[in-house]
Amino acid sequence: MPITDEQRAAFDKLVHSNQVVLFMKGNRNFPQCGFSATVVGILDQLTSGYKTVNIFEDPSVRDGMKEFSSWPTFPQLYVNGEFVGGCDIVKAMHAAGELKALLGGEGKPVEPADDKPVKAPAVTITSAAAAAFKDAAADAGADVLRLEIDAQFNSDLHFGPKAAGDIEVQSGGLALHVARASAARAEGITIDFVEGPNGVGFKIENPNEPPRVKPITPRALKALLDTANVELFDVRPDSERALASIPQAKKLDDAGQKYLASLDKKAPIALHCHHGTRSRNAAEQLLRSGFTNVYNLEGGIAAWSRDVDPSIAQY
């Protein structure tokens, strides 16, 4: 059914209610789909002054904005009252620096020029790691030991050709070539060779790495709940909570969000949804807001019903 002139005027007022308005599933603190979480993550890098509209809270907005924007999916981003696009368009504009320029910035920052001095990072290679590298170097030929660390602090340690701009550091009797853009992220790292549950391998400890979401099993979460060592929040909408709920879980309505915001940033927080995907997105957002001890229930309430409390309905 087409939207009325009155509805169109209301939507026009809504998209002009802030310089940046994002129509999404969930809100900026707790996105309820991966695409919405991606756009929130991008906006958080560029501005703090944007507004989100949760389409789950008003079916008329969810249905009407599709016609108003001539765009069938969410999220939908508006800047200065003009429709920008959905997740893929926002990602492409961000990568090109166009979104930052649109928001009043200066475009995408560039890596340091090759002729600008970059400090060599302090790196520790343990004796065990050095021995393993020396064994592997025998088959590496002319390749060098290289380390790259991306913006998400994922490390790629390998033998390969030396790249322009690499910074060579010495440790453990070895030469390690650190990618120029990774130098600051590599400061103070330790590279070890250890034995774990899946065999032996290299382990990198990076003091610069931000906190990550910790996966937790249903039984491990129950143990924390039994000792009151974690706060559990349910990111699902009321319609799903009516089907099945974990008694200890607080819902993230306005009161729940206020309570969460009042907690110490170091407090242990756990999130759950149906299968674990939406809660992981929300957990990542919690980390971006400053919380440092965040768990995601792997498998969601479905796994909880299977492994902990079979009386909770599956749906």
Image (tube, rainbow, N blue to C red):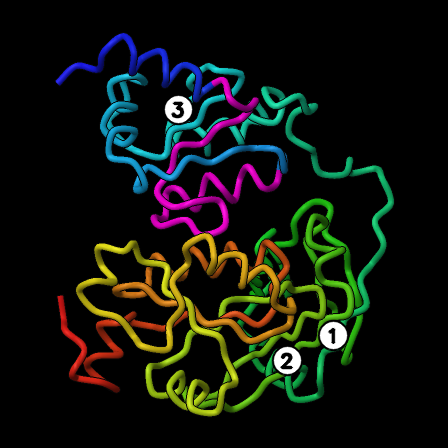
First in residue order: circle 2 vs circle 1: 2
Q: Is residue 278 above or below residue 43?
A: below
Q: Which amino acid does the dot numbered 2 rest on?
A: Lys
First in residue order: circle 3 vs circle 2: 3
Outermost residue on the top side: it is 5
Residue 29 in magenta stretch: yes
Q: Which amino acid does the dot numbered 1 rest on?
A: Leu
**Marks 2 and 1, how far apart at CA:** 8 Å
**Marks 3 and 2, how far apart at CA:** 51 Å
Pick whichever, 142 or 240, lies toward us: 240
First in residue order: circle 1 vs circle 3: 3
Location of residue 27 in the rendering, given as x and y in whole percent from the top left corner = 44, 44
- Mark 3 Cα shell of 10 Å, populated few (<14), some (14-19), many (≥20): some
Location of residue 196 in the rendering, given as x and y in whole percent from the top left corner = 48, 89
The image quadrant of residue 154 is bottom right
Of circles 1 and 3, the one toward us is 3
Residue 43 in magenta stretch: yes
In the image, taking residue 83 as reference, residue 62 lies left or right, namely left
Residue 85's disc is 3
**Whether label 2 touches label 1, CB < 8 Å:** yes
Pointer 2 residue: 134
Pick whichever, 247 or 308, lies toward us: 247
Q: Residue at x 64, y 82 (%)?
A: 192
- Give the secondary structure at mark 2: helix
Q: Where does the magenta region start and end?
A: 16-45
Image quarter in which the C terminus is found: bottom left
- Give the secondary structure at mark 3: strand
Pointer 1 residue: 174
Q: Residue at x 83, y 49 (%)?
A: 118
